[in-house]
Amino acid sequence: MKPARFTVLLIVLSGVCVCAMMHAKRVTADDTRPTATAVPEPRAKNGKKLLTAMDLMKVVNVGSPRISPDGNRVVYTATETKTEKDKEWKTSTQIWVAPTGQGQTRQYTRGEKNAGSPEWSPDGSMLAFLTDREKDGERQVWMMPADGGEAWSVTSHKGGISAFHFSPDGKQLVFVATDQPAKDEEERKKVKDDTVLIDRDLKMAHLWLFNLEKKEEKRITEGDFTVSDPQWAPDSSRITYTVRPTPKADDGGLSDVWVLSIASGEKKKIEDTPASSDSARWSPDGKWIAYTGSTDPNGGVSTSYLYLVGANGGSPKQLTSNFNLDAGTPVWSRDGKSIYFNSNVLEANEIFSTDVATGATTQLSKSGTSINVAEISKDGNTVVGTLTLSTAPAEVYKSNLKFMQPVALTSHNRWLSDYTVAETEIVKWKSKDGMEIEGLLTKPVDTDGNKVPLLLNPHGGPTGASVKTFN
């Protein structure tokens, strides 16, 4: 964890009444008091500033990068804390666009309301996003021209929307929405009965279609389960989605992938096994579906493997059977020959690729910190994602498929270059059974080898790791 130096400034104000339209008062001996002097900003020995608690509030967090169909731009979100004087501090998330070539980043949305989950229309002419500008707490899909301009509301689903995607043909949206309260719950709200029963009255989320031309919505899943992560087939004929028994955290590992046919409404499970499956993604030609899954039927602690199954069914193939780390959400190469994913390697999150034909898995990035693969351009040459350093928060990057030299596309936290940030190093020790364990050690700035107090931050295992990122 990066140390923060806190400066406490005690300002003693003498009682002074400044009255408008009056002449200055003659100063007497009793009126003369020492004037409080400003405490200088804390600085390191090299003259650079040291981070304070208020400085940390200025950090901007970027995420959700999506590359445009022509590969020339990346849309993403930037989240910052508004610490305006005499106003309540608020977190604000807005939509930004960065060119993948020359040019400056540009903010596309503004105002009091947050905007998130940006997505390009398939033809690249529009940008869509979620916001609750019209009604607090009810996010709807809004759109604006891809070059910027006034946005307008597209959907008006009761209760709001949590996620959406354009169909590849650009004619429909699939969106996820939580079921609305029953009539008796609505009545209780009217009389201010805000009783909450834990693990009772759970609200399930289901899938809906929205016809962009007719402005009509249609529910397409129903049942005593909750749905997430809808993904379109390339020909817009089918949708994969993840089903869980409830939205409770304890049921997170009890997931199954299903496939729904738009024309017939037919639904079928992607594999007939008790093990979990999740994060399904279609191959570019629509013939295959890659997904992650475990071998534990109870949803417990288990390695997450990468699987491949035919889009029309069949026996799944475990691609990463010889890979002993967890496989993250699959991202297909445009030629369909490789699948990219993230995995936690000791103190880092790195990018790997698996050969679809052989299952051979190769580590591509060597960041030593945290790099994420989000999307690959249509021409198959450019990858975008986020890259975090141990001394700097995440920024959007672009790279070729070898990940040799990722290039930053954003610089929302360039102000940190005026500061000295503590460095973090890897430390190692032997466990009782002889296994080598690794951890992260962050030393305060300007310690000069002197002894300082140690703060130990252990984490739970074996499902988590401390990653060498900006913290």
Image: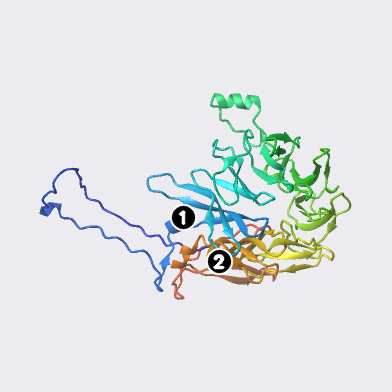
Q: Position of residue 428 (x, y in %)?
A: 62, 71
Q: Is residue 292 left or right of residue 128?
A: right
Is residue 456 at all visible to an observer of this figure? Answer: no
Residue 61 drawn above or below residue 187: below
Looking at the image, which residue is at 51% across and 56% down? 60
Q: Position of residue 275 (x, y in %)?
A: 81, 50
Q: Residue furthest bottom?
A: 449
Is residue 409 at all visible to an observer of this figure? Answer: yes
Spatial CA distance of label 1 from label 2 is 18 Å
Q: On the image, which quarter does residue 48 sit in?
A: bottom left
Residue 401 drawn above or below residue 163: below
Looking at the image, which residue is at 60% across and 51% down? 146
Query: Circles 1 and 2: CB distance less than 8 Å?
Result: no
Q: Nearer the viewer, residue 437 or 27?
A: 27
**Colouring mode (rainbow / by chain / secondary structure / one colour):** rainbow
Q: Secondary structure at mark 1?
A: loop
Q: Which residue position holds label 2?
A: 390
Q: Position of residue 310 (x, y in %)?
A: 86, 53
Q: Residues within 10 Å of mark 2 (few under 14, many from 20)?
A: many
Looking at the image, which residue is at 58% across and 67% down? 440
Q: Nearer the viewer, residue 362 or 193?
A: 362
